[in-house]
Image (spheres, rainbow, N blue to C red):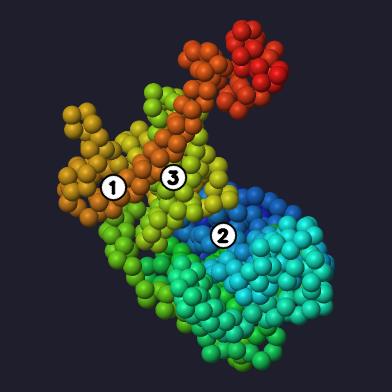
């Protein structure tokens, strides 16, 4: 490795350190590969780590036996590639932030004489578009409130007609389609609605009055829905006494690392008011590196599809690549973006508020966290599993072959991240290989979790470890084999003696062990999810087979058609000649008679 280090090119690039088993330890970027990598080492009397490096880097270097690098054309490209590789490969000594969700915005295009508010997560083309947000939560409630309280054009289709509809009759629209309101008067209503998006107090007061009115009219379901809307809007933004008199538009990011996990807090200020906020936790890493954390947080949040980007980002403290990240974002969005770490004044109060909230969030410790820690200790996992993906596949006699992935995150099921897979493989081993391979191929979009749990035994564990090793991904994996009594799977909690397969060996816990119950809970949810998908797919398959049977097509011919065309939809679209070639003229006439008619 010494010869390689001493002969690195003096160009921008990304470098990767590996341990003796080929496991990826660390990914870094450099303006000059030669200078950056050399700075880690001393070459006399023999190659050894530079003692001036941080404890985290020294620990990594003590395990490193191999180095690989990729040359790129600019430091900006190196920064982007570094971020992408960390997200996909989950290196042992890098921080991995998983907050890669896109947030909705409310926008209005005022090029129309009677504009409407809409919700989007992407950039909308137009010169007179104004965005409000982002709204990590409560955005839909705000949107609905606008149409509940203001007589706006309720639907896109409303202006296409020339006659007032039901919305006008119930006084939710002023019927511009019949010319009953001028663009100028309608514009005044739009202006009131726009102010309500940033000044929440008057909006909530109007909703409360509306709720009381509905209750008095004994329209209790509508009153309850309005109450829920009020609660959702109330939770949108962080309650703070900070309210700047100016029209400051800034985003505030604060990252704090705790003993067991870290947290990223984001505040969004528009026109001097904090309009929304969000937070996300990240796994505990060996030693925290704020530079890596802020790089990832900012590059992942401000994607090219971000609908509205402010020009100033605030952080509580400077980090090494702050100027480079600002330059990369400026190039990405073709306008000047600055990142500042204010030390005094109102902006400093904003970053302090974000840090204060981060510490408060770290103090909260769900009961599930204790079990997760105990599981990590028992199974010698590399990190506490805060995000877990569990897999199972299901089929019946080779029909309706499907796979399911469920996700446990921060002590709760993350159902929005559940995934269903239609599988092609025929045997269960190949099905698991296909299922996991497809998930690995998606790591570039959705980073790997802290732990995989597989329904099955040693064979499935070996498949997963082999696939991850080939992909260069660091990820803990365990498998849980269902105990079988009288040749039947036995799932009952408190009685099952399921076996756990791990890299450290085989574990058989007592049936009343809470750690076993926690793992079983993950497995059983994956099984339920996969079975439900299988049943739905099988039901649809049987319906389609039944329809073919009515046309005189028997099971053997159905199989022949499916083998040739692939899907029932393809069969239904096939021509007379195609079906006749696969089967015979009689069946072709029967299946295409409607088309011929």
Which residue lies under the disc numbered 1?
Answer: 520
Q: In percent of the image, x 37 and y 61: which residue is there?
A: 411
Q: Where is residue 336 in the image (x, y as percent from the top left)?
A: 76, 73
Q: In percent of the image, x 63 and y 12: which residue is there?
A: 588
Identify the secondary structure beneath mark 3: strand
Q: Position of residue 373 (x, y in %)?
A: 31, 61
Q: How crowded is mark 3: few (under 14 residues within 10 Å), some or many (20 or more)?
A: many
Which residue lies under the disc numbered 2?
Answer: 100
490 versus 398 height, above or below: below
Q: Position of residue 456 (x, y in %)?
A: 33, 37
Q: In percent of the image, x 80 and y 66: which residue is there?
A: 178
Q: First in sequence: mark 1 or mark 2? A: 2
Q: How crowded is mark 1: few (under 14 residues within 10 Å), some or many (20 or more)?
A: many
In terms of depth relative to the viewer, which is nearer, 500 or 59? Answer: 500
Quadrant of the image for the C terminus? top right
From this viewpoint, is residue 276 visible? Answer: yes
Q: In which quarter of the image is residue 344?
A: bottom right
Q: Position of residue 361 (x, y in %)?
A: 42, 75
435 versus 570 height, above or below: below
In 3D space, how far apart are the residues under numbered discs 1 and 2 (Cα atoms)?
A: 29 Å
Identify the secondary structure beneath mark 1: helix
Q: First in sequence: mark 2 or mark 3? A: 2
Lateral position of residue 310 relative to residue 141, left or right: right
Q: Quadrant of residue 317?
A: bottom right
Lateral position of residue 429 relative to residue 195, left or right: left
Between disc 2 and disc 3, the foreground one is 3
Q: Which mark is residue 405?
A: 3
């Amino acid at each position: 490795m010494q010869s390689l280090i001493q002969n690195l090119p003096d160009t921008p690039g990304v470098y990767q350190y590996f341990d003796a088993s080929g496991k990826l330890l660390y990914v870094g970027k450099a303006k000059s590969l030669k200078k950056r990598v050399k700075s880690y080492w001393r070459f006399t009397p023999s190659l050894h780590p530079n003692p001036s490096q941080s404890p985290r880097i020294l620990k990594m270097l003590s395990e490193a036996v191999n180095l690989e690098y990729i040359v790129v054309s600019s430091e900006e490209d190196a920064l982007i590639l570094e971020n992408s590789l960390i997200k996909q490969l989950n290196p042992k000594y890098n921080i991995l932030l998983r907050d890669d969700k896109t947030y909705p915005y409310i926008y209005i295009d005022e090029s129309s004489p009677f504009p409407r508010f809409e919700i989007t997560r992407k950039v909308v083309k137009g010169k007179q578009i104004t965005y409000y947000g982002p709204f990590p939560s409560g955005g839909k409630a705000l949107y609905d409130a606008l149409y509940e309280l203001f007589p706006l054009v309720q639907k896109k289709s409303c202006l296409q007609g020339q006659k007032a509809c039901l919305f006008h009759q119930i006084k939710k629209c002023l019927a511009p389609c019949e010319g009953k309101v001028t663009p100028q008067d309608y514009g005044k209503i739009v202006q009131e609605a726009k102010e309500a998006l940033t000044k929440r107090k008057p909006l909530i007061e109007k909703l409360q009055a509306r709720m009381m009115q509905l209750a008095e009219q004994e329209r209790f379901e509508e009153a309850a829905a309005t109450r829920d809307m009020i609660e959702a809007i109330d939770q949108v933004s962080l309650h703070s006494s900070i309210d700047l008199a100016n029209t400051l538009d800034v985003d505030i990011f604060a990252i704090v690392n705790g003993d067991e996990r870290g947290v990223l807090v984001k505040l969004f200020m528009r026109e001097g008011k904090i309009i929304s906020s969000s937070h996300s936790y990240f796994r505990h890493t060996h030693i925290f590196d704020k530079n890596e954390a802020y790089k990832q947080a900012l590059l992942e949040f401000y994607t090219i599809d971000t609908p509205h980007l402010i020009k100033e980002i605030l952080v509580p403290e400077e980090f090494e690549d702050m100027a480079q990240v600002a330059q990369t974002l400026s190039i990405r969005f073709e306008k000047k973006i600055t990142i500042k770490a204010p030390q005094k004044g109102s902006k400093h109060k904003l970053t302090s508020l974000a840090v204060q909230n981060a510490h408060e969030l770290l103090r909260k410790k769900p009961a599930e966290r204790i079990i997760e820690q105990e599981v990590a200790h028992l199974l010698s996992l590399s990190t506490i599993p805060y995000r877990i993906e569990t897999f199972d596949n299901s089929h019946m006699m080779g029909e309706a072959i499907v796979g399911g992935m469920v996700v446990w995150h921060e002590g709760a099921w993350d159902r929005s991240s559940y995934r269903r897979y239609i599988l092609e493989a025929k045997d269960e081993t190949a099905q698991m290989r296909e299922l996991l391979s497809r998930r690995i191929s998606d790591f570039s979009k959705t980073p790997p979790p802290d732990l995989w749990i597989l329904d099955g035994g040693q064979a499935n564990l070996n498949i997963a470890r082999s696939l991850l090793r080939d992909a260069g991904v660091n990820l803990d994996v365990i498998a849980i084999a269902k105990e079988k009594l009288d040749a039947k799977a036995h799932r009952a909690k408190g009685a099952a003696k399921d076996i756990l397969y791990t890299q450290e060996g085989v574990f058989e816990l007592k049936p009343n062990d809470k750690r076993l119950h926690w793992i079983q809970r993950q497995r059983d949810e994956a099984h339920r999810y996969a079975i439900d998908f299988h049943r739905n797919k099988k039901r649809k398959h049987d319906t389609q087979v039944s329809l073919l049977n009515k046309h005189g097509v028997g099971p053997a011919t159905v199989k022949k058609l499916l083998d040739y065309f692939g899907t029932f939809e393809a069969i239904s679209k096939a021509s007379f000649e195609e079906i006749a070639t696969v089967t015979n003229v009689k069946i072709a006439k029967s299946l295409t008679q409607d088309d011929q008619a």
